[in-house]
Image (cartoon, rainbow, N blue to C red):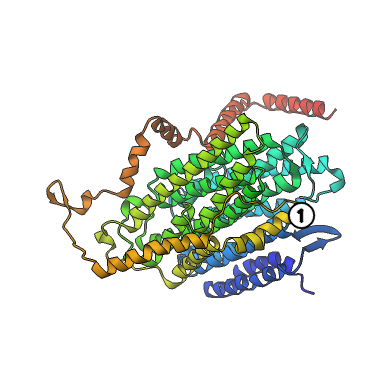
Amino acid sequence: MIDYILLLVLLPVIVGIVNLFLPVVLQKILNSALFIFLLYPVYLLFYQSQWTFEWMGILIFSVDKLSLMMVVSIQIISLIVYIFLLKSLTRVHEKIFMVYYPLTVAVCNAAVMSVNSWALLIAWGLSGIFLFLVGLMGTQENNSESAKKTMLIVGGSDVLLILGLVLLRFLEYSNGWQLWKIGMPLEGELARVAFVSLLIAAFAKAGVFPFHTWMPDYSKTTLTEGVAFLPAALDKLLGIYLLARLVTSVFVIGIRMNLILMSIGAFTIIAAVMMALIQHNGKKLLGYHAVSQVGYMVLGIGSGSVLAFAGGLFHLLNNVLYKTGLFLSLGSVEKQTGTADLDDMGGLGNKMFLAFLPALIASLSISGIPPFNGFFSKWMIYQGILEFAKDLTAGQQLWALVCLILAVFGSALTLASFLKFLHTIFLGKPREKYKDVKDAPFNQWLATGIISLLCVGTGLFAVKMPLESLIYPAMKEMGMALPVWLGTYSPLLVFGLILLAFIPGMVLFLLIKNIRYDEIYLGGMEAVEKFRISGTGWYNEVRNMRPLKGIYTAAELKIFDLYSWLKNIAKGLGKLLSLLHMGQLQFYNLWIIIGAMVLFWMMK
């Protein structure tokens, strides 16, 4: 019998290695066959309660309902992004990218299916290496610096992942190196150190404050296809998957830790969306929103509420869709215009309608506008926080309420940010230099069109797909009760009411439309394009508001950048060591003796 669970890892590895020796045309054909075929074992997974793979009597991979949800998401989004990049990469990049792509899918599949610490470490580390390698493929001058920054934050957190897993092995010796089904109380110093270490690894991968600063820079400088594939999708899946395991299967956490996680999530939402508001580069704006949206997931999954937990997982799946759709839509524009600078665009809606419509749907989804999918998951998280707050003390209720208010306010600012995004790119007066711009090619609008349909479909039919088919079974298998709704929301009813208002208005407009086109004047003179006002200018006032001006200035000076702090500390230590080592042999011998004495003292 074919071991399909192993095929999800081995087959992409084989294809990636073979692609090293093939021309681009054959690479594309082989990869296409691979990603279509991988849907078959995923389909089969729905009809078996659990798949496992053992090697030398050691359980390596296992697919339960939670990992099934991740595997399904990885295969679907990988296929969609692959459709887009079939005709988007330059000749310089496409040959090596066609090698990295299946290998990245393989290690991500392995990471979410691993139930052995060593298997998880290998897969997790390799996914970080491919994140770095794809980052090096950017077209901007500083792409190598952002890739290095990514490697140091994400790769550096792997050290803490190792520490956490080793401590788990020490604390639960009888469990061996097996993962997940532990249920350890968060008591004692070693347990807390293990929890925090694993939590930081999850946060760094997903891009949670304060380990988020690699993501906006990476988004700006790296190939759009790579950003849509990794930080916007697969890295989010891995990071939040680990977080969900930590708070349900590995540790038993209390209300205090729930409130801490909620606070981190709420602060991530508001801090990142405030930074997104003032961005002038479309990819960096989307990078900050990728950070902001992960805050909702941490808020829901870390809250301790069953309903919010389900909403957090649902929001993860939603984010993979609309965030990937936004990056790919912007990528289509960037391919045609040669820029992702918002100040340099405008009026492209008529020229690139097939890029504008998916961008509009994804923008409404991420902003939480009903009946799109982003609203449903946020609504579940908000309800879950209210449910969680019922049994808290007065002070804790206030704490939870502040987190809820920040999340709702963050959603409003997200809408404001995407009004800017849509206006500066697609609306307004068309620029003369883009008069010959063409719409996105077939494969690109097909990919973004599929994502748009999924954003609408998972909003209208959310209970059936993915809640009842993917999320609820995973929660039930983990011993969690199914969520109890605090209110009633019918996406189909809301959609019907929207149509009821929209259709008569559109009919009336078509019957009596009388559009008058006037000349535009600026200061009494005919407007000249070089004096045009970009849509980003309206948001400069936010940058100059008090006390936000000081905070923004500090952020631009890297005051809140963990990487900058670590780099400065490393430089300081380097200077200190250079002072201690004077280049003379006797001093080197002295430090060797002192180091040996310290080592012996630690081992006694």
Q: Amino acid at mark 1?
A: Val
Residue 169 visible, this orientation: yes
The answer to whether residue 72 is above or below residue 238 is: below
| Quadrant of the rendered image containing residue 9 | bottom right
Quadrant, the C terminus: top right
Secondary structure beneath dot 1 equals loop
The answer to whether residue 134 is above or below residue 204 is: below
- Report the residue at 62% width, 38% height from top: 389
Coordinates of residue 546 in the picture (x, y in percent): 38, 30
Q: Is residue 438 left or right of residue 284?
A: left
Total residue callouts: 1
- Report the residue at 66% width, 42% height from top: 199
The answer to whether residue 143 is above or below residue 497 is: above
Q: Nearer the viewer, residue 394 or 41?
A: 394
Q: Residues within 10 Å of mark 1 (few under 14, many from 20)?
A: many
Coordinates of residue 174 in the picture (x, y in percent): 87, 46
Q: Nearer the viewer, residue 142 or 2?
A: 2
Residue found at the far left of this picture: 524
- Report the residue at 37% width, 63% height from top: 502
Quadrant, the N terminus: bottom right
Q: Nearer the viewer, residue 503 or 597?
A: 503
Residue 222 visible, this orientation: no
Coordinates of residue 415 in the picture (x, y in percent): 42, 49
Q: Nearer the viewer, residue 357 or 329?
A: 357
- Report the residue at 66% width, 57% height from top: 471
Q: Is residue 530 left or right of residue 447?
A: left
State the residue position of label 1: 115
Coordinates of residue 184 in the picture (x, y in percent): 79, 41
